[in-house]
Amino acid sequence: MNLLNFIAQFPDEESCILKYKEIRDNVGVKCSMCNGSTHRWIENKSQYECSNCGNRTTLRSGTALHGSRLPFRYWFIAMHLITSTKKSFSALELQRQLGHNRYEPVWLMLHKLREVMGKRDEEYQLANVIELDEGFFSTIASDADKDKPLKRGRGSQKKSKVLVMAESIPVDGQTTKKGKPRKVGHIRMIVINDLKSETIKLLVEKNIEEKSIIDTDNSNSYSKFKDIDIEHRPQIIPKDKVNEILPWVHIAISNAKRLLLDIHHDIEPQYLQSYLNEYCYKFNRRYFGDKLFDRLLIACVSYKNNN
């Protein structure tokens, strides 16, 4: 939704609370004590009471807002800003927009939203034809590596390894509007510690449906694909043919790097996955339009963060 519609729909804290309760009532409430699903709402306490054991649950409890003391409207504004643009917002910029006096709660709120995005995407596996490759993203060297001589290239302490998968469907000898030989579906980006074949194989089993087709280069990291139920089509790819054979996986990597460079500087390795979650979530829902805000709101109600 655009800014004017957002302000009209959620002008104050009460309107945000009512919307959050509406979504939570639709999703359902699970009792943390007995796992019961039947509750009644206690208006004067603003809590759910389990019909089975009498345990009470707050509106935030068991959701992405669990433990947060920030107003509901802060969360709604953050969700609107994230979903209304292709780009992202830094915590510092969001803090400035909210006029909040502390940085840490705003930073944590954004990372909780990104974690929820990642959990939502984990519910789905990629299918059909998938391009697969690794990307190397610039991050800050960890404390353990700062005193070591700086390596160059892929092995650099300032590079984090990311496994990138993109559904890539051929268009029957034609090209897309952008001149690509394939059209892109969903993508997945996962930060990995190493490029060992066993590591890659386990992630492929988890994130890609059986019987799918995977196109890759001829790297030894993919040698164990023969042990799983997929069709693997490795090939030696000349540099000038990369955009023809693996067009979308490299576009995804390039666009993600550009987005992070524009918004987030000096990313620490442990937070890279969070930013990639946001990029992939919005890319995979690029045609949702105004519905994207509501989808993220439903995800916030449905998933509790690890933090």
Image: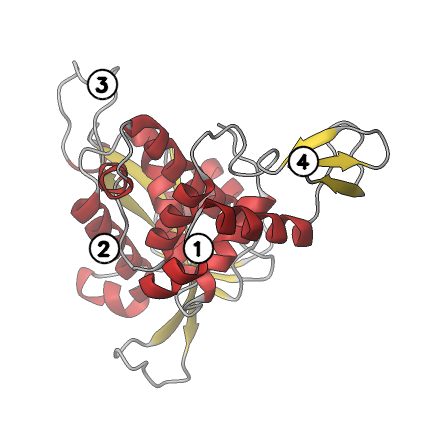
The quadrant where residue 200 appears: top left
Q: CA distance from mark 1 to mark 4?
A: 22 Å
* Residue at left offset 34%, top offset 48%: 219
Above or below — where is 37 with respect to 69?
A: below
Q: Disc 1 or disc 4, which is closer to the eye?
A: 4
Q: Amino acid at mark 1?
A: Phe
Q: So how many labels did they put on this image?
A: 4
Q: Amino acid at mark 2?
A: Ser
* Residue at left offset 32%, top offset 82%: 175
Q: Can you see residue 227?
A: no
- Is label 2 in a helix, a strand or a loop? helix
Q: Which residue is mark 1?
A: 10
Q: Disc 2 or disc 1, which is closer to the eye?
A: 1
How packed mark 3 is, by other alpha carbons closer than 10 Å (few <14, some 14-19, many 20 or more), is few
* Residue at left offset 30%, top offset 31%: 269
Q: Amino acid at mark 4?
A: Asn
Q: CA distance from mark 1 to mark 3?
A: 47 Å
How packed mark 2 is, by other alpha carbons closer than 10 Å (few <14, some 14-19, many 20 or more), is few
Front residue (pair 250, 230): 250
